[in-house]
Image: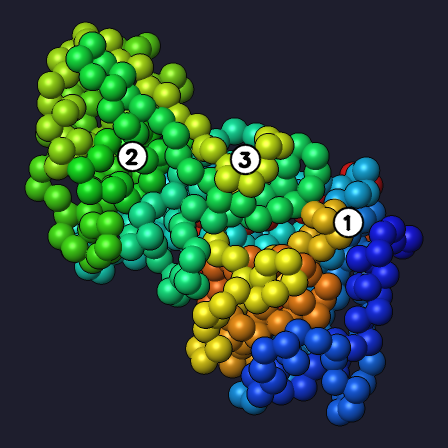
Amino acid sequence: MTRRGQGSGRFRAVRGALAALTALGTLAGAALLGAAPASGVPGAAPAATEIAPGVEYRDYDIPTPRGTAHAHVLDVDLRHPRVRVGLLYPGAVGARQTVSAMADQEGAVGAVNGDFFNITETQHPGVEATGAPVGPAIADGDTLKAAVPNGQRFGPALPPGTTTEDVIGVGADRRARLDRMTLDGSVRTREARLPLGGLNQYALPVGSVGAFTSDWGVTSRVRATCGTDTDRGAPCSTDTYEVTVRHGRVATVADAPGRGAIAPGTTVLVGREAGAQQLRKLAVGDPVHVRHRLVPSVSSVPYRFVLGGYPLLRAGAPLPGLDDRTAAVRTAAGIDEGGRRLILLALDGAPEYRGGLTIAEVAASLRQLGADDGFSLDGGGSSTLAAREPGAPGVSVRNHPSGGAERPVPNGIGVFSRL
């Protein structure tokens, strides 16, 4: 395969060096992000395999003080005219499916799992876990959802200065970048204009009104009124109200959030505390206009796809405060060549590799692969990398999920290449 650009040359240059990554956890700061050690090389790194035009796969060992981690990598050339990446999801925000099933349904040649998600509700007995992701999501240029409050997220603690609004995405200019997506929306009635506090989210800010559309799916909306902005396990609110808006007018009202499919063109408004009190002022037949969009903080180029997680690297430097103690199986994404190259990495969860990497080590590994920017995705039992063998009808899972089988997840990054 012929690669273009300075970053691709850098990728070739570090292939042999990757196998020389010894004791990542004992290296510190700039030394970890510099050149690979010149001694202790256990052997040449295996060559990458082109699985489709513009897409390469490879795997390699990463020795650590805890044992060996094993990485699986998809290297995606976004300059290639046949290549694109997009959001994989099961057709609804509040739903889950395996990475390989989503990839095959959409015809992807490779994929990794995506955002952290509402996986369980042990602190709220009787409340259904929605399976919905934490952060914003955009698919094929259409906004699916906004971010839950920081205190409502699932997953490890966020690095200092990051939020649930942080995303990785690819714009209409075919460049990958890190950004932050903020919800801008309102509910306009005859008497007032209310700020919109959420869009298709499993958790709404205290005192807010959130909107649910047909993109949400059939999952119960009760979870949206549980917990607080700072405590995910706090009790569910006892002051709630729901209003269904159809063709711009109130169609039904209810004292509690419901469940079931939402028809296209219909919006269900869920309020808690002060938001519920505002919704109670509405009566069936009243006009209501709901507006919402996601606003990026960096890019002026519209996004084709976006999903959540949290940043690890910016401009080649690890974020301050990255966890360097807790090791686990991880999935991450890196960006190189000014957004023209996307690196997707998932660790193997087989017993012999389950020691994994710390978040600081993941950042270092992405840097060794040439990434200038890096982004952490969900890990543990969710970590999955699938890729299609040349000539095969579908993808196969290349790593060993740590739970022994693929975990259904809410979304992922799909890699597409026209043969």
Lower sequence index among marks 1 and 3? 1
Observer-side mark, 2 or 3, equals 2
Q: Which mark is residue 77?
A: 1
Q: CA distance from mark 1 to mark 3?
A: 20 Å
Mark 3 burial class by Cα count in 10 Å: few <14, some 14-19, many 20+: some
Q: Is residue 411 above or below residue 330?
A: above
Element at badge 1? strand
Q: Residue at 31% across / 24% down in the picture?
A: 186
Label 3: which residue?
A: 139
**Pick the front one: 357 or 188:** 188
Number of labelled discs? Answer: 3
Label 2: which residue?
A: 197
Looking at the picture, which amino acid does disc 1 mark? Asp
Element at badge 3? strand
The picture places residue 133, in percent across and down from the top left corner, at 41, 47
Figure quadrant of residue 171: top right
